[in-house]
Image (cartoon, rainbow, N blue to C red):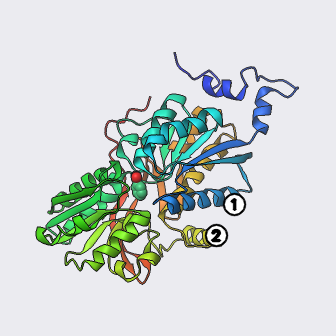
Amino acid sequence: MSDITKSGFSRRSILKSGAAVAAASTIPTGWAIAQAKPVKIGLMLPYSGTFAKLGENITFAIELLIAEKGGKLGGREIQIVKLDDESKPENAPQNADRLVKRDQVDVLIGTVHSGVQMGIHKVVKESGTLTIVPNAGNDVITRAECAKNVFRTSFTNWQSAYGMGLALGKKGVKKVAWVTWDYAAGNDMGAGFKEGLQKSGGQVVQELKLPFPQTTFQPLLAQIPGLNVDAVGAFFAGGAAVQFVKEYAAAAIKAPLCGPGFLTEGTLAAQGASAEGIETALHYGDGLDNPKNTAFRKAFNAKAGRDADVYAVQGYDAAQLLAVGLEAVKGKIEDEAGLYKAMRAAKIDSPRGPISISPSQNVVHNIYLRKATGGQNKVIGIAAENLADPGTGCKLT
Ligand code: BEZ
């Protein structure tokens, strides 16, 4: 039996809002009461550990967009509930369950870490809770495990790494080593990097890994000179990226370091001279010259007291996507059919440039080539234009 009623509202949402008998009536109905209630958004993000700053920037940007809209989306007040997921996959199902069942959130925005995302995904696939992913890139959640209630405004790991591999091969680089954490994000990005590199004539000759969130890089760095590679690609992010880039520079390894842009994103001030000249590829860059970006960076800095980065942009766009949906249904979040239709068709003016949503509900965007110069990830070209993840195996029902 379909879970969509004739009105287009799901049984789940009607039960939740108590609006089952909300027909045309002059006395306040369940529907009217539900309309008066704020839309509750659960933010499940890391506020501690190596990804803490990523979670904070996503949060600041979501709050910024809501404030810019006068505290309401589609005419509904917004209430935010925050939960620190600590980037711990083992706690993820229980944490997601708390937001969905105990706090009864209408929307879950989360998270950063791909392993934690898998835990959220199991819970929200079951509950049907609208979920917007503001960072975690694990390919599978918008591929074989895709779900009609799950959208992503950040990237797939494949998208971020494929562009870098492609650009590197085009420069004539042939032999490359790949260094990363051994978990979903590092492995997905490794696969994307390899695919792009192979397509443009290079190859990954060695992969070096350590468990998340370890940062004992020295044993891996010690192996690199013996590999005789032309370049080293790496995925690390947050505090660990700061440490890796500094230790790489200190080791005076000849092969230039590159990677998906997380390696130098939001970290350049702490990395200092050790990051100078590192080329990365990402869907954002400093100095992207468009009016939306200029306004966003100014407003973000005023709110957060620091510069925006890709994580802030992804959070802002998660809120922008929700705003598109809620505005289309005039705040009736219970109108799932209308809400999802509008979100799928969204064309958003993002600080990263124009974005849209692919058939598997993942963001489509440009991948920029950047070079760390004087404390900024300066855009020096486009590695892949309007890149959509292939969405392999996704069947939305
Ligand atoms: C991830 O786990 O998917 C991830 C974390 C930080 C930056 C990029 C990706």
Q: Residues within 10 Å of mark 1 (few under 14, many from 20)?
A: few
Label 1, on which residue? Answer: 68
Q: Is residue 84 left or right of residue 256?
A: right
Q: Quadrant of ligand 1?
A: bottom left
Q: Is residue 27 left or right of residue 299?
A: right
Residue sitting nearer the eye, 190 or 7 = 190
In the structure shown, which secondary structural element does the residue marked by tag 1 occupy?
helix
Give the answer, above or below, for where 351 lies relative to 113.
Answer: below
Q: Disc 1, disc 2: CB below 8 Å?
A: yes
Q: Residue at x 67, y 42 (%)?
A: 40
> What amino acid is labelled 1 in the image?
Glu
| Residue 186: percent from left, percent from top | 31, 54
> What amino acid is labelled 2 in the image?
Ala
The quadrant in which residue 256 appears is: bottom left
Label 2, on which residue? Answer: 299
Give me the C-alpha separation between circle 1 and circle 2: 10 Å
